[in-house]
Image (cartoon, helix red, strand yellow):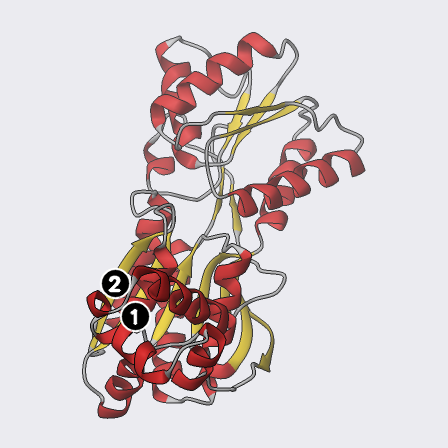
Amino acid sequence: MTLLGKHRRSSGKVTLSHVAKLAGVGQMTVSRALRTPEQVSAELREKIQQAIETLGYVPNSAARELASNTSRNIVIVTPSITATENTLILNGLQKALDDVDIQLIILIAGKPNWLRELVNYSPSAVILINLNVPLSERNWIANSGLPCIEIGSKQRTPLGINVCVDVKSAVEMMIDYLIKQGYQEIGLLCARQQQAIFQQYLESWHKTLLSRFRDPQLILHSAEIPSFSGGAKLFNEALLTWDKVDALIFLSDELACGALFEAQRKHYAIPYKVAIAGLGGLEVSQAAYPTLTTIQIPYEQLGKIAGEKLKQCLHDAHHSLEKETIQLETRLIIRDSA
């Protein structure tokens, strides 16, 4: 684990009067809109909501709960709760927080107005899992003064505490291993995932292959979520599309194992005809035949460390204002498939 640096965020507190001033209404109107919104016109509610989002205002109920040490809402925002990596992160997070009197609330980022839902929960902290946060939402979180923990890939400008892995170095590590093994034509196969994380993978892919004088154009992408069946489809498409390809990197162990299952069904010898490698280090990679060469990403450990940092933030208000990057190491696991 590497601690890459920390610095403090501004602690300026946004109050009800700030919201009222920006919305052009009285403080009582803002208070009424928050407590009994049905008593305020839709037009005024919209103005007040826009002011809340612009300023990063958090209703006072969160502060009261924190001061009284009663149950606290921690809002987790993620694009998916079914993705294997997110499930593992959530498991680690829950284990670390089992002894804390808090309520974990999960919001799906793909749904409209998730930020408004977040505000309505009056959270004591926000956790973002494998999420590329749009600018307006980033501004609200940054202005709110709430502890924020981003879990997943390394962030250029973290909102708070970034518990992460360097996905660029993970891709580079696998490419270098395959080249060292003598593979010449390497293809990249991927499915739907967060755009920001996918972009980091692609940047590393192109930069690494070009610097090693290899063709970076061998890329196939599926619009489906990663799955075994998706991996099988990508594998068949790769064999039809690329005549000379001798190694395939899948940006998911599920995709890679799907390809291995399909190769076994077709009696296609792996790695003798083509090598297959994955990314993730999931348990299924050990059960596949042949066993899968992969990059292990410590998903559950990311969640555990994030949970420990959250407890520190809730216990120490000053600590919650510090920006910090905690980078965990990835590891190449060499097995039979490559």
| Nearer to the camera, 140 or 160 | 140
The residue pinned by badge 2 equals: 105
Residue 298 rendering spot, x and y as whole percentages: 43, 55
Vertical order, 215 against 132 (above or below): above
Label 2 vs 1, first from the N-terminus: 1
| Nearer to the camera, 69 or 241 | 69
C-alpha span from label 2 to label 1:
6 Å
Kindly tell me whether residue 216 is visible in this rendering: yes
Mark number displayed over residue 74: 1
Vertical order, 48 against 270 (above or below): below
Residue 51 rendering spot, x and y as whole percentages: 45, 70
Vertical order, 14 against 40 (above or below): below
Kindly tell me whether residue 160 is visible in this rendering: no
The answer to whether marks 2 and 1 mark residues whose Cβ atoms lie closer than 8 Å is yes
Vertical order, 308 against 154 (above or below): below
- Please tell me which residue is depicted at 78% across the width and 34% down the height of the picture: 210
Q: Secondary structure at mark 1?
A: strand
